[in-house]
Amino acid sequence: MPKQSSEAVIEIRGLYKSFDENHVLRGVDLDLYKGENLVVLGRSGTGKSVLIKILVGLLTQDEGTIKIFGKSTAGLSLKELNALRLRIGFSFQASALYDSMTVRENLEFPLVRNVKNLTRKEIDMRVEDLLDSVGLSKTINQMPSELSGGQKKRIGIARTLILNPEIMLYDEPTAGLDPITCIDINNLINEVQQRYQTTSIVITHDLTCAKQTGDRMAVLIEGKFKAVGGFEEVFHNAEDQNIQSFYDYNFIN
Ligand SMILES: Nc1ncnc2c1ncn2[C@@H]1O[C@H](COP(=O)(O)OP(=O)(O)OP(=O)(O)O)[C@@H](O)[C@H]1O
């Protein structure tokens, strides 16, 4: 794993978000350092996806500040926000491939839409390079319905990478996969980090995924990060009962 930089690419301070009486985020502070894979852990419904959606502008916080690449996201114009979004790749929980498009067309779509004046050859090279990176060159003309769950996840990751994002956000990358395929996806996340020098947030409640991919863990409990640090540091010395039971629960199940 790469040496952790001290340069924060995302700085979150005092973030609050409620939906009516449901107070989901209650004072979230977090720094994401350049080059690291930071795993955000938390039980179902604790607000992990809400946090990610706020980061990519799909939801707005009630209170608190976010700086991305040193710049506050508050008051950005639509143009600036769109430019920022292109630097952040969001790999959705459900891969979100277009069922009516081939793998090639799925990968081309964000490229053609967002990067002007590319030649056919440049598009083909980029698509082929990304498919090669995720080990699925042979699927280029297949439809998503012909792919396994693990292959869909890989194609989803390739599609997210096609715009060369500096930050990758993975939402439950191993959800619904068998244990061996989970290991493949975890390895892929690490390969992406090395090959494309990305900085990532990996959202999961899979502790194996957390251990294999995370340089640091951040555990979201009751709307706040209760522990942030290396896997051993967070789990093996956990005094907080919530963190301990989260660990026990994962290893029993
Ligand atoms: N758009 C919304 N409107 C109202 N409530 C919402 C909305 N989005 C999320 N919530 C609520 O916020 C809480 C946190 O949801 P979130 O999806 O972030 O959980 P999570 O930690 O990602 O869970 P999981 O691990 O199951 O994906 C839940 O109680 C959910 O019902």
Image (spheres, rainbow, N blue to C red):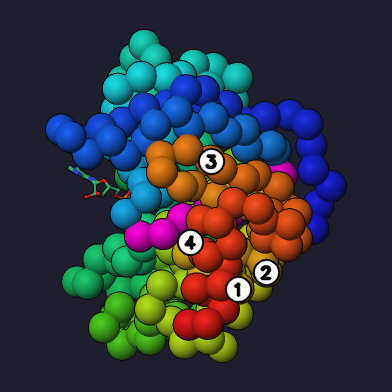
Q: Amino acid at mark 2?
A: Gln
The residue under label 2 is 212
> Alpha-carbon neighbours of circle 3 within 10 Å: few (<14), some, or many (≥20)?
many
Q: Is residue 247 above or below residue 63?
A: below
What whole-number distance in Å separates the C-alpha atoms at marks 1 and 3?
20 Å
Q: Residue at x 19, y 71 (%)?
A: 100
Q: Is the residue under label 2 in contact with that under label 1 (CB below 8 Å)?
A: yes
Residue lying farthest to the top in this orientation? 75
Q: Amino acid at mark 1?
A: Thr
First reached walking from the N terminus: tag 1 or tag 3: 1
Residue lying farthest to the left in this orientation? 20
Q: Amino acid at mark 4?
A: Thr
Which residues lie in the magenta part?
35-44
Is 36 situated left or right of 10 in this image?
Answer: right
Q: Is residue 114 above or below residue 252?
A: above
Please, what secondary structure does the residue beneath circle 1 have?
helix
The residue under label 1 is 208
Q: Residue at x 67, y 29 (%)?
A: 8
Is 235 situated left or right of 250 in this image?
Answer: right
> Which numbered tag is attached to residue 225?
3
> Alpha-carbon neighbours of circle 4 within 10 Å: few (<14), some, or many (≥20)?
many
The residue under label 4 is 204
Is 40 included in the stretch rendered in magenta? yes
Q: Is the residue under label 4 in contact with that under label 3 (CB below 8 Å)?
A: no
Q: Nearer the viewer, mark 1 or mark 3?
A: 3
